Amino acid sequence: MINGSKVLDHPIRWAMVGGGKGSQIGYIHRSAALRDNNFQLVAGAFDINPERGMAFAAELGVAPDRCYPDYKTMFEEEAKREDGIEAVSIATPNGMHYTVCKAALEAGLHVVCEKPLCFTSEEAEELVALAKEKNRVVGVTYGYSGHQMIQQARQMIQHGDLGDIRVINMSFAFGGYNYKIEETNPAAKWRFDPTKAGPSFALGDVGTHPLFIIEAMIPDMKIDNLMCTKDSFVEGRELEDNAFVIMRLKGSKSVQEGAKVYCWASSINCGARHGHKIRVVGSKASIEWDDERPNQMTYEIEGEPVRTLERGAGYLYPEARVEDRIGGGHAEGLFEAWANLYRRFAVAMDAANNGEEYGDFWYPNVESGAQGVKWIEKCVESANNGACWVDYE
Amino acid sequence: MINGSKVLDHPIRWAMVGGGKGSQIGYIHRSAALRDNNFQLVAGAFDINPERGMAFAAELGVAPDRCYPDYKTMFEEEAKREDGIEAVSIATPNGMHYTVCKAALEAGLHVVCEKPLCFTSEEAEELVALAKEKNRVVGVTYGYSGHQMIQQARQMIQHGDLGDIRVINMSFAFGGYNYKIEETNPAAKWRFDPTKAGPSFALGDVGTHPLFIIEAMIPDMKIDNLMCTKDSFVEGRELEDNAFVIMRLKGSKSVQEGAKVYCWASSINCGARHGHKIRVVGSKASIEWDDERPNQMTYEIEGEPVRTLERGAGYLYPEARVEDRIGGGHAEGLFEAWANLYRRFAVAMDAANNGEEYGDFWYPNVESGAQGVKWIEKCVESANNGACWVDYE
Amino acid sequence: MINGSKVLDHPIRWAMVGGGKGSQIGYIHRSAALRDNNFQLVAGAFDINPERGMAFAAELGVAPDRCYPDYKTMFEEEAKREDGIEAVSIATPNGMHYTVCKAALEAGLHVVCEKPLCFTSEEAEELVALAKEKNRVVGVTYGYSGHQMIQQARQMIQHGDLGDIRVINMSFAFGGYNYKIEETNPAAKWRFDPTKAGPSFALGDVGTHPLFIIEAMIPDMKIDNLMCTKDSFVEGRELEDNAFVIMRLKGSKSVQEGAKVYCWASSINCGARHGHKIRVVGSKASIEWDDERPNQMTYEIEGEPVRTLERGAGYLYPEARVEDRIGGGHAEGLFEAWANLYRRFAVAMDAANNGEEYGDFWYPNVESGAQGVKWIEKCVESANNGACWVDYE
Amino acid sequence: MINGSKVLDHPIRWAMVGGGKGSQIGYIHRSAALRDNNFQLVAGAFDINPERGMAFAAELGVAPDRCYPDYKTMFEEEAKREDGIEAVSIATPNGMHYTVCKAALEAGLHVVCEKPLCFTSEEAEELVALAKEKNRVVGVTYGYSGHQMIQQARQMIQHGDLGDIRVINMSFAFGGYNYKIEETNPAAKWRFDPTKAGPSFALGDVGTHPLFIIEAMIPDMKIDNLMCTKDSFVEGRELEDNAFVIMRLKGSKSVQEGAKVYCWASSINCGARHGHKIRVVGSKASIEWDDERPNQMTYEIEGEPVRTLERGAGYLYPEARVEDRIGGGHAEGLFEAWANLYRRFAVAMDAANNGEEYGDFWYPNVESGAQGVKWIEKCVESANNGACWVDYE
């Protein structure tokens, strides 16, 4: 059991780009990374306003001389130090992810990057190649995938508990953007600006989350082709606020040839907070999971009563229990899910540092990030061509 | 309040075709029709085995001389009596619906018919025309639409509580046919035989139920076009056991132009009993309803806590309370939903008999039945052409 | 399978006292009794207003000469007929139950009586003795006990699936009487008048329902002693609107010596419609049931995932499936629960008529009614003596 | 908004007694204390095995010379340092809480202590007096009370949203001790040994949690008297594994005179993980909360639909939003609840250091700890005297 224990002898020297004062996403990065002493926050370029950044660095206990006005300076200056940073997390607006990630890899740093990794498959492939060349870890914060029940689902599918997968019905469909929020809320404005948000809103902002979760649950899943409809229901939006995607899967070890996936990505689903639900239907049984009640998952063997599995319970697969931090019944939340990913990032980084393989586990990596970018591209291509079918490869 | 009261002075003289001993569907027809003394069961052609039919008629208190070996004889003989039947319910295998319905209308009878009304739009149009010509009622037993919460939804939408409808996410996706059940269960076998079941299984067997429910909730809804994928996941099936449909709606009083509907019809959704759930998303609020807990419906105004509406409660619209039979909190079920429809059938039949309009309510009528047939045709057309988009009109 | 089938060769000739026009309770009696053709409504004293009663009788198809101004006349006149009534249902105000029930038994009639059967144990014992002497059936409409899941619970306990019962936590705690409703609502007024409602409100009105359900689930259950607190939280009430009861059980086949039962009976539990929930905890497993979602029951084996059992499912005990009327997944409601009881009443009445035992099933009988009366007395005795412990026998 | 921000200029120098390698409770203390940089872990007596303690200190980054073999040495040695510890958390077996807490206060340290604070009211009063005399903070880790919904409940009650409180129905009733687990599981064994666990098991282990939560929700709540039954359903146990408590409350600002509270504390409630649920019923509305889904709370105004409140939502009271760390919809868990308490402990400690009042918030303090001890004593007194009523003051 590695839960709640430090896993590295020496913490990784770590910095952040972005995620300054008041940023919730910056806060969760730090909470997750520092949770188990596997990372040490030693530097940062937290804010585009250097003064504000400096004040925030002081709050965080980062030495003033290691608080930088921008990421370039940080990568340069830190490279000169013997105790310079080894890894950096990128929590900037989406439009900078690619540039900062590339610069970090070129500087020989491990990276943890918010999704989307970048805006085009071309960029994504470049990052994949660069990460490989440099032998550096790129972790992508598909944070919901760190919940223990995702591990349980992955093991169940691998052990054949569901039989062959036939249908997946999933959504990340929240409300809140059901009116022209971007007129009054600056934090929402950039999301509908293609130059800042990339080629999509709902698909990229939320749709890639369930996509990655099913990839994590079903590592052998391969998309054959897909179709997508997207709409901007609120007037004047350049990017979609609602999309439906249907995918056809190829046959593989755990997937029946021709299996179908439906994904609903939305920001105008009134009343839903996340609406992030995943149902995987196999030939024997189904599972269903909802990120808002992440400690439970239903397991439905056809012909038997529906079972509600509980995080931390003794009947789960060992892989779903190893990250248990506080015992079944107690509610773990998103912070623990992220901390689980950061722990895996640490182990992978450490292994790369030592020229070793990191062993028998998975994390959302640079290919996972690239997959999300490609999926958005394909969806947009379909939607822009009359919601036609588009080959995936 | 008409709940639990007889609404006609004289009960309608009524017969059944099919629905014999041991038939659950026959039982619910009788329970619903006889519940409030608006129908009187006076004749029947209950069984293809005349002897068995006769024994069953006796159980039901139907006079032996009005128990017939087949529907033709019944229509002929009853026509000769002054106290002959006025209405007939058809609970035969699907393949007979069209023929019996046509014969009944030609005999001047009102009809209550199981869905599907028939197998082709051509047949459907014929029945629509015939019903009009004869001024006879054809009620179709989309039984779930009789639940009181459907009335509430209809009123909410009409009153603008949801704003403009943008997205509908719905399913009737049950398990149980996840293996080759038709090899061992004769009751399942005909369902995959196109000559007996028509051109589809999942779409027709279950998909038309949520379709009709949203038609009942949104009378001004118009489908613009649709696409459909269908699959036979269990080997050797001639008809689909799973289908996805996406529809584009036209703009109308309560629907935003381009609104999208997703429908999942399945018989291989392991672990689900019905999986019959409907979520309607408007510009202001959403509602969600599940036929397995029909006494509740969620009402989700964006920015406010989710509310759970309860059948029978004082805060519902009057139209949703008028059919209350036993008071909020008490569970009403499918039998009451059917009884509500049969009550409306009775009122409509009585009005037609008297050459009157039946007033300010709705019931699933011959056009509703025709709409289901057309929808299946369009879905099949799309699915058979590479899941392409098909215009609806 | 007897579901939805007539069980008697000849329906029992049946009448009602009370339950006139607009009465929901009258409606459910008739719906339940007539559902399967085991009873035939041939007479009635429906209303204290004879004219209104006569009009209502006509609606129900009861012959005018068998519609009586009062129960005494009805019992007398019907006794003179060869085809006179064999059974009567009593749906009058509580204060008349004892008198009418006694008169009916003395007239040699079977009885179905609303709870409470009467107001004192003395009266109850008299009715028990009279029913025995006359060999007549007295069914008491603890209607919720007719739900199929109660049968399942009974079988599970009998088969030892729960192990020894240790704790029961139950409630029937609704809202709605949280303010002085009796000032404006005449239907509520008599409930707080001891001369009309008997010695209690909440305990008698709702508390006896879960009490009878656990008696039905655990036929060998014996109360050793109990204590009760009762309160009138709304000012000026003579009878309690809230009560807590704790019971100690004797050891028996399925109950551990000293098992404890908690019961919360309330009419001031804001926001709850029924709040009628029963949790039975055994040494191996627990079950939990809620009358507002009667088609489901949780089954919780310690150390295993919680299972949700569904009405009509193949994995239930046969006794829980025999009364299935419409197939699992479809919602059955309170009307079916009552119809199940009325079917059993019919079988028991028929057996008594023939001088036979009625076989291997149970129904809420005169002893069940007497038990409720005694329980209220004991609770009141405790509450009136400082909520002290009171021996039950 | 103080969420996710450091609140003190300088972190408090902090140590732990107990909570060594593998201890989940030690882990949650550290996670919570260190989350926001308000505490710095500088010393510890983590383990009764000094070698193991030293190795663990290294993992945590505690200097070897500040890792002590026992608490006495730690308090002595740290007192000699200018940068000595200011606060200590106690995560030892229950039997040591009193002694270590007293020693810490005498050493002039702030204390965070696991519940129970001690075993007798005499001890508790001594600690209360000592804390006052020394002007030191004693925080008690009733961790569930740190959930944001408890703040919401407290504000709702204070603002009169529920009206006068009349009834509370609550439980902390888990399974897992339904068999003689103490024979095979050493971690369970001490819990039934009065010399190590104090005078009760279920009441003290779990019952005091909901008790404190209602105290936090209703600061003006005063118990008038109570009665308690307790049982050891598993053979051979010296302490109870199940208890029922009924309390009578005094009238106060938000409580109706004579309000009743029911509490079920159990370790034999098969199938339940925590079973920690609290329902508060007022004259206008009720609220209900379950620690296993802590991000939701129902709000039930009589006569209106039940509302489900969601953590982080804009419609909550500001006090319930100020501790929001990651935005509504995202699941926060027990770690955040604890971190919220530790943040308040930090502010209170800082204020005490500066001789100031700590302002307008609450935390579970030494009186809260003392109240739990007293409640257990009174419950045991009642249970040992035939479950009689016992005055509380």
Image (cartoon, coloured by chain):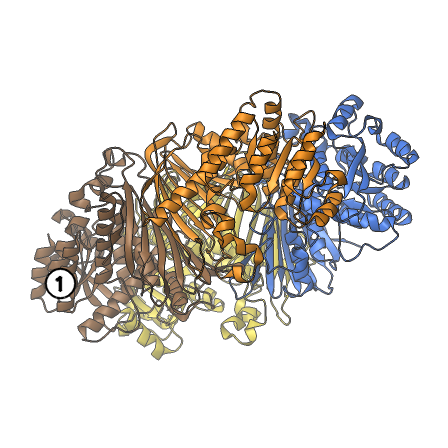
Chain colours: A blue, B yellow, C brown, D orange
Look at the image and tell me whether residue B158 can be seen.
no
Q: Residue at x 13, y 46 (%)?
A: C49
Q: Is residue B194 above or below residue A276?
A: below
Q: Secondary structure at mark 1?
A: helix
User: Which image quadrant for residue C230?
Assistant: top left
| Residue D239: percent from left, percent from top | 44, 53
Instruction: For label 1, count other residues whose C-alpha is less than 10 Å away and answer few (under 14), some (14-19) or many (20+).
Output: many
Q: Residue at x 70, y 37 (%)?
A: D43
User: Which image quadrant for residue B302?
Assistant: top right
Q: Is residue D54 above or below residue D111?
A: below
Name the residue tied to disc 1.
C105
Quadrant placement of the C terminus of chain D? top left
Query: Relative to C383, is D319 on the left or the right?
Result: right
Q: Residue at x 51, y 46 (%)?
A: B288
| Residue B88: percent from left, percent from top | 36, 63
Viewer-nearest residue: B189 or D38: D38
Query: Relative to D62, is B156 on the left or the right?
Result: left
Viewer-nearest residue: A393 or C248: C248
| Residue A383: percent from left, percent from top | 72, 45
Quadrant placement of the N terminus of chain D? top right
Look at the image and tell me whether residue B306 can be seen.
yes
